[in-house]
Amino acid sequence: MKNQQRLIVGLVLTLVLIVFALLNGQGVAVNFFGAQFTWPLIVVIVVSVLIGALITALVSTASMSQNKKSLEGGPKSGRGRAGGRRQEPAGRHCQAGRAGRGPAKAAGGSPRAI
């Protein structure tokens, strides 16, 4: 449904642009880096819109690429090999060498919280 709305809005805006361009068909002088051209206003409008669309596409493609890299775990994402979880120091959550020997005993003989 959302794509249909975008298509309809795009078609309406295109229609408005075409009507605007057809109503403004007189020739205009265009100065471009020292060169001077006389083009119909419709051509100037359409070329300007196409250049703007190209710039927008290039910028959005670049930003989407950066967002995709950061979501995939690139260097800027802050996620290391642990998949986004914070790694605890080795001595905090397990006792190396104590596997299978039961709970650790404190100095007083009672089990110590790990």
Image (cartoon, rainbow, N blue to C red):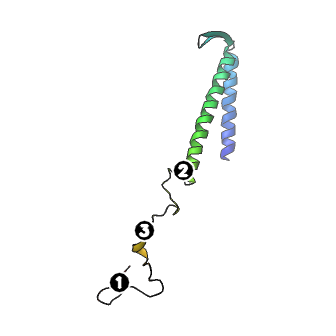
Quadrant of the rendered image containing residue 60: top right
List the residue tagged with mark 3. Answer: 88
Q: Residue furthest front?
A: 97
Dot 3 or dot 2, earlier in sequence: 2
Of the image marks 1 and 2, the number of the one nearer the N terminus: 2
Q: Is residue 27 something that shows in the picture?
A: no
Of all residues shown, which one is farthest toward the left?
Answer: 108
Q: Identify the mark at residue 112; answer none if there is no mark.
A: 1
Density class for disc 1 (Cα within 10 Å; few <14, some 14-19, many ≥20) is few
Residue at 59%, 10% in the rendered image:
34
Q: Amino acid at mark 3?
A: Glu
Residue carrying label 2: 70
Q: Is residue 90 left or right of residue 109?
A: right
Determine the secondary structure under disc 2: helix
The nearer-to-camera label among 3 and 2 is 3
Dot 1 falls on a residue whose secondary structure is: loop
Q: Nearer the viewer, residue 82 or 53?
A: 82
